[in-house]
Image: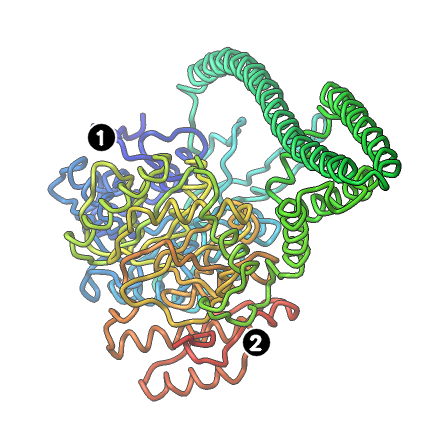
Amino acid sequence: MGEIFERLRPQKILDFSGERLTNAVHGQIEIEHLHRYFLAMEYCRDKDVLDIASGEGYGSALIANVANSVVGVDRNADAIEHARASYPQSNLRFQVGDCLSIPLHDQSCDLIVSFETIEHIREHELFLAECKRVLRPGGTLIISTPDSKIYSPDGRPANKFHRRELTECEFLTLTKSYFCNVTLLRQRPLLGSVILSAAAGEGKVTTFDRRGDDTFETNSGLARALYLLAWCSDSTIDTPAASVYVETSQIEVRDAERNSELRRLEIELASQTETIRRLEELVAGYRAREVEHAKERQVQKIEQSMDEWLQIAVQRIEKGIREQINEALNSNAFMTPVAADEDASARDLSVARSEIERLSLRLHAIETSTSWRALYPLHRTLEGMPVVRTVLRTGARMLWRTSTRPFRRSSAAVPPMLESKTERTAEFVVSEVTIPIASNKLTEAVNPLTLTPVQRRVQIRAIGSLMPAQTLSVVVGIVTYNNDDALLRRLIGSAQKAIKKAGGKGAILFIDNGKPSLVDANITKIASEGNIGFGAAHNRLMTKAFETLGADIYIAANPDGAFHPDCIDALVRMHASHGGQALVEACQFPVEHPKVYDAVTFQTEWASGACLSIPRVIYEDIGGFDEAFFMYCEDVDYSWRARANGYDVIINPSALFLHAVSNRENADKTWEMMLKSGHILARKWGNTEFAQWTAQRLKELAADPASSHVEEVPEEWRSVANFAHNFSFSPVRW
């Protein structure tokens, strides 16, 4: 019989993030992780061991069964707190720390275990240098990582948590550059049968691989290994023996549980499908009734207008006839022509009344026709296309005036007041069509005090102030870094009030890049990954908002600001007026950005991330912020990308957000951060002059520009970028 050891089970189970193994996870992930730790345990006996990126702590606890001492290090404070509470052992301690700056003294451990860590960072050389620093002379590093050619065959990381994966050749080259001796093993999780010789010694292993229903492949050794394990040391390494992890005891039980769960889910799905079908029938009935009611209301309006016009026209005609009769009675010489005119006017009146009756019958026939019902959705669609609707209405008016001209023998047939109103309306509408409503190129700023009535109408339409109240789902995202609790309470309270006033359909998400901050019971906290930067943190929140919560709009809000009670409602209405095809920035007060925006259409060159609302359509098209920017300029880059892809970038002056743009600390560190972001922006958008200028300023601060690779945007996009105004990135208004 072999050695028996027990795996401790904590009372509290951490949530599964999608990558890190917890006690709630079983199957392949559990098997491949446990196998690595079991194999490493034989090399950890009576040694001082460091488990870097220890996660929830189960692996460190296993090693502590045989090691002299074990230190588990992880940058996630929640995981470290959980590990300390779950695995209290005298020779085991856990500590918060980063693999790029290991919190241990030089030459303080005999062996380092690092499983599935290196692919989560980009600074591989710095990580291995830190491992060499804390290892004692002759110490050993046991490290694993997926083979990118097998794990991510299309060249892009299949795992969203991975930053830089390595091939087998790259992995060997990297480890051999820091250690004299490197022994490489391959690992492949599998379900099958293992046949090994009973004789002592390693022996030769042959694998038989199923490649199809009736196709098999024979290999000497393990083919298509998913993971690479390396034993690294400056001393001689005993080649690890081949090992097998056997998972048999629970396979049948878990299969039965899984089948039972599948049957339960199938029944639940069938029930939900039936519920959805009934709801769809109800919605269809409601829509049909709404169409009928809308048609009735429209017909009533038309009939009322026709009755009013007919009444006025008949009154004018009768008045004219009476005046002519009176004049004829006063002069016998004109009796005969007056009588003729009276007869002609009477005939005209009779004809007009007959024609009106005929048109009324025709209108009734139209209302009850199939074509009217079929075209009604078009009428509703045109309600959201004011310019097109105006042109069609103008054409209809002109056609009506032409068709009814025979019944208007003189200008007296239609009241002058009504006639002039119709003419003025037609003239106004035709001129309105010439106004450019939307354009990717910023139009020339217009003085609001000199707006024409047409421009004012376009302005009202652009801002969405007359849009009906919307029921769109809104998520407010807050990223903090060592912010004051009082300011956070102010922001959260203002966001809750603004969401409620906008219809109450929304939520607040929170992520902390620094020390733990105030957490309100009414908001959802996303697990911190350390100080990952403004854009990267908001990307995590946007993923949660759009892909999990199903939000229509995401609003990024600075933690040191506050929403006006009407702010979110104003943002939602403006989104609705633009069909969800625009980035909308709230107006910051008491001091706003001085950048130019069009006074009619409110278009601007870029939108500030201090309070920026992003619709689902744009997120699904162009994604989130570029995480190459740690802080600053990521909102400029995002705005340019949106404009380059055909979307509008606008500001809503009626949506107020308390946040003075001048509240930044004028420190060298802040200036250095801005210069690095500006340097990345210039390289990405192909502006050599601005890149050289930022590089020179960084050199004066004894700082280096970003050395990482920056992927340039397509040539046809660069027309939207404007570096002429330094870090303003647009002309200023004042």
Q: Which mark is residue 12?
A: 1
- Is residue 662 shown above or below 56? below
| Front position in the image: 494 or 1 | 494
| Residue 583 percent location from the top left of the image | 48, 55
Q: Out of 381 and 581, give the one closest to the viewer.
A: 381
Task: Please say which color scheme the image uses.
Answer: rainbow
CB of mark 1 within 8 Å of CB of mark 2? Answer: no
Q: Position of residue 608 (x, y in %)?
A: 40, 63
Q: Residue at x 31, y 56 (%)?
A: 657
Vertical side of 593 occupied by 585: above or below:
above
Dot 2, how many residues are within 10 Å of its Cα: few (below 14), some (14-19), or many (20+)? Answer: some
Q: Residues within 10 Å of mark 1 (few under 14, many from 20)?
A: few
Q: Mark 1 falls on what kind of element?
A: loop
Q: Position of residue 64 (x, y in %)?
A: 21, 42
Q: Nearer the viewer, mark 1 or mark 2?
A: 2
Residue at numbered disc 2: 686
Q: Residue at x 53, y 54 (%)?
A: 457
As rendered, which of 324 and 127 lies closer to the eye? 324
Residue 185 seen in the figure: no
The quadrant where residue 352 appears: top right
Dot 1 amino acid type: Lys
Q: Is residue 372 left or right of residue 575?
A: right
Residue 519, placed above or below residue 633:
above
